[in-house]
């Protein structure tokens, strides 16, 4: 019996064909998601649309479009690469989207997916009464620089410092800041949290620090393990960096300043460890109890 090699680039002609094929392959490979998509259908749609240089929010108009041989070859390659490498799709496309804004990413930074991005889309209305009054802001653990950029958009009068302990991450952030033409408003700083920011005070401090527990990191699927460990590692209980931030944040806030920190699943542990702090939890459409806010006056209770 003669075996016949199946070449998808010869068999599948339309976007609809490739979508079905990619979803089947991704499900069979038991891929993991969580870097901008949550399932095989959305992941396949994103990779197909990006590879074909089509708008990533418009699948329906193109489903029955006939593809050129070169386009089919490109799709076959990206689908197999996603499966064989188990890298997040954003590392294959060098692109991540937050609130309709595109950012360059690669393996030097975590794929951005902070709930603070959702809050910035609403200009942090629950805690910031006058967005125009934010004059100085800080984005701790800036990574790709996406939150600093979104903050610059949300608060047009703000000068923003964006710091990270990783020099490689700052190189990525610099590229994004330049892409958005914000180099006059966003200053990138190499710092372990507040270590290099002595004497600086801010009206708003944003932080999306590492907050994953050691046992959770050990159980990471390959997609999450592909990201820089430094960007995830929050110590035994996931709160090591969060505690360090809370301990000194008051020294870096203006009199009416506000601290906003994403803590993942650490709410209950934080409330037990800091019973005197009146945490305000800022929920979003996609999260509950994962982002906290405290004022400078409230943080003073720790001193």
Image: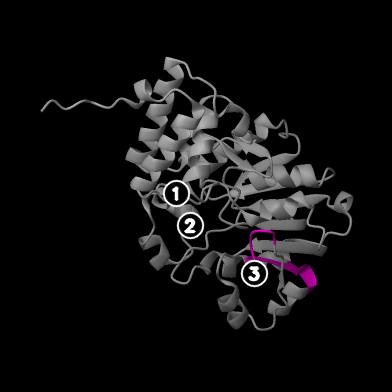
Q: Earlier in the sequence, mark 3 or mark 1?
A: 1
Q: Name the element at disc 3.
A: loop
- Which quadrant of the figure has residue 202? bottom right
* Residue 291 among magenta residues: yes
Residue, disc 1: 228
Is any part of residue 106 visible from this angle? no
Residue, disc 3: 289
The spot of residue 275 in percent (x, y) is: 65, 83
Say few, some or many: other residues with alpha carbon within 10 Å of mark 3 (under 14 / 14 to 19 / 20 or more). some
Residues drawn in magenta: 284-297
Residue, disc 2: 232
Q: Given contact means CB atoms under 8 Å apart, are the residues at marks 1 and 2 in contact?
A: yes
Left or right for 195, reference 240: right
* Residue 81 among magenta residues: no
- Which color scheme did the rendering employ for the protein? one colour
Left or right for 128, reference 57: right
Foreground label between 3 and 1: 3
Q: Between marks 3 and 1, how big is the CA–CA gap? A: 25 Å
Is 89 located above or below residue 261 in the figure? above
């Amino acid at each position: 019996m003669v075996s016949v090699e199946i070449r998808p680039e010869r068999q599948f002609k339309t976007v609809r064909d490739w979508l079905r094929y990619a979803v089947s392959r991704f499900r069979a490979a038991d891929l993991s998601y969580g870097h901008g998509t949550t399932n095989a259908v959305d992941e396949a749609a994103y990779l197909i649309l990006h590879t074909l240089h089509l708008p990533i929010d418009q699948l329906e108009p193109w489903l029955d479009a006939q593809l050129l041989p070169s386009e089919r070859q490109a799709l076959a390659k990206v689908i197999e690469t996603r499966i064989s490498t188990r890298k997040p799709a954003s590392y294959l496309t060098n692109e991540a989207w937050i609130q309709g804004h595109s950012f360059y990413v690669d393996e030097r930074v975590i794929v951005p997916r902070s709930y603070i991005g959702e809050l910035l889309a609403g200009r942090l209305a629950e805690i910031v009464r006058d967005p125009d009054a934010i004059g100085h802001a800080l984005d701790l653990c800036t990574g790709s620089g996406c939150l600093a950029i979104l903050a610059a958009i949300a608060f047009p009068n703000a000068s923003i410092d964006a710091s990270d302990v990783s020099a490689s991450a700052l190189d990525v952030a610099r590229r994004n800041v330049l892409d958005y033409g914000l180099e006059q408003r966003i200053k990138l700083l190499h710092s372990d949290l507040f270590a290099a920011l002595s004497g600086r005070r801010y009206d708003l401090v944003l932080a999306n620090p590492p907050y994953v527990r050691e046992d959770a990191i050990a159980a990471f699927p390959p997609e999450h393990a592909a990201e820089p460990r430094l960007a995830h590692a929050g110590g035994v209980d996931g709160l090591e960096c969060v505690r360090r931030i809370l301990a000194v944040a008051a020294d870096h806030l203006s009199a009416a300043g506000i601290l906003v920190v994403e803590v993942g699943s650490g709410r209950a542990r934080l409330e037990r460890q800091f019973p005197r702090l009146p945490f305000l939890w800022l929920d979003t459409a996609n999260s509950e109890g994962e982002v906290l806010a405290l004022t400078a006056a409230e943080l003073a209770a720790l001193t």
